[in-house]
Image (cartoon, rainbow, N blue to C red):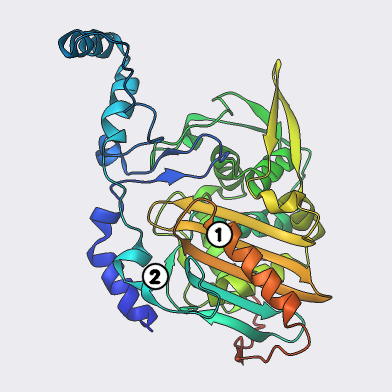
Amino acid sequence: MLSAVTLVFAASALAPAAQAAGSSEAGQSKPGVNAPKSTKSANSAKSGESGKSANTGKSANTSKSATARAGSKASPKAKRRSAMSAAPARPSYGQIAGLHATPDDLALKSSVALVIDQDTQEVLLQKNQRAVLPIASLTKLMTGTIISEAKLPMDEMITITQDDVDTEKGSGSRLRVGAALTRAEAMHLALMASENRAAHALGRTYPGGLSAFVSAMNAKARQLGMQATTYVEPTGLSSRNQSSAQDLAILVAAAAIDPMLREYSTSHGAQVAVGKRVLQYNNTNRLVKNPDWDIGLQKTGYISEAGQCLVMQARIAGRKVIIVFLDSAGKLSRLGDAERVRRWVEHNAGSLRPTGALPTRTSSAVPGTNG
């Protein structure tokens, strides 16, 4: 098993290549382009559509000329998307480090996994749990924690500004600049639908501004004992937001105590009135609607550097468990891994033996937090 230090070194050394392409998860239905400003043209928000061609019986030359004419009329944004769709998928940090080669008894598609008993802190399943990787929109769980503990007025109106527009990956949002919504609505959309502009606005309007908010995120991580975790912004669009499965399990356990975080993260959907428009948002995790699951708290995440990620607190076979998956290989594989774990726990409910325990969390007070 690779150590966290080895993994961070490998990922950092290849970071420029890994950061060259990927998608933000915001809204899940319209992933955005996942790259820094200087590399936006190398990435694709969607693949498979712009590369299609229609065979209508016309000659190849006619088809090519028609394509050329269509291309000349296309908007610059459409041209960029067409060119970017041909770019090969970039490997995640976990793939670069070879973490997917680590075997496990359940043949999980996630390169990192951790399942613990929430009440006893016993580790039931572990796979590369100390590896430090980008965590994408799992970041928003800490964002919600900080907002909740700050006891700010949740009915206060927040206006989306140009500062909230993603320049890290170029992802889109249905919350236009100038849109106004309450802090509660922004929190709901950030946790349930992974809305990036909503999450950024929460951090920007925090007392002291965005820098104070990020400081509070990192201070809270230290307070909880998340020693391998670093936050640089509140959305998860940056691959420099990094953590381990072991640290994230600690965060999930802490966040699962908060009724607001539980309610907003597991909500099936929500309608938000923004000006004259009413926007319908749905949960990025379809398992919350599955009657086989009893989920108390959850968050999904995705950027190319992180792969597909998922954290959950759920009750399985009468047992409260915390599940963490990082760097899952496909869009639905994290859900498949969750189903494998659920069936495994149910089948072995009376015979599961712990393989360890999480480190004891620290209890030192951190200035500026309510923890």
Relative image position of residue 207 (x, y in whole percent): 62, 49
Which image quadrant: the C terminus? Answer: bottom right
Label 2 sits on residue: 100
Residue 75, relative to residue 243: is it above or below? above
Residue 64, relative to residue 332: is it above or below? above
Q: Residue furthest front?
A: 57
Task: Using the rendered view, name the quadrant where residue 181 is placed.
Answer: top right
Q: Do the numbered discs 1 and 2 sit on residues whose CB atoms are within 8 Å?
A: no
Residue 324, relative to residue 91: is it above or below? below
Which image quadrant: the N terminus? Answer: bottom left
Badge 2: how crowded within 10 Å, few (<14), some, or many (20+)? some
User: Of helix, strand and loop, which one carries label 2?
Assistant: helix
| Residue 319 is at least partly visible in this image | yes
Residue 79, relative to residue 87: is it above or below? above
Between 151 and 119, the residue placed more toward the observer is: 119
Alpha carbon separation for disc pair 1 and 2:
13 Å
| Residue 367 is at least partly visible in this image | no
Report the residue at 41% width, 35% height from top: 46
Mark 2 or mark 1, which is nearer the start of the sequence? 2
Report the residue at 48% width, 32% height from top: 172
The amino acid type of the residue labelled 1 equals Arg
Relative image position of residue 64 (x, y in whole percent): 19, 14
Relative image position of residue 151 (x, y in whole percent): 76, 54
In the picture, measured across the screen, residue 106 lies left or right of residue 365, that is left
The amino acid type of the residue labelled 2 equals His
User: For the image shown, how many numbered marks are present on the structure?
Assistant: 2
In the picture, measured across the screen, residue 64 lies left or right of residue 318, that is left
Label 1 sits on residue: 334
Badge 1: how crowded within 10 Å, few (<14), some, or many (20+)? many
Relative image position of residue 305 (x, y in whole percent): 38, 56
Label at residue 178: none
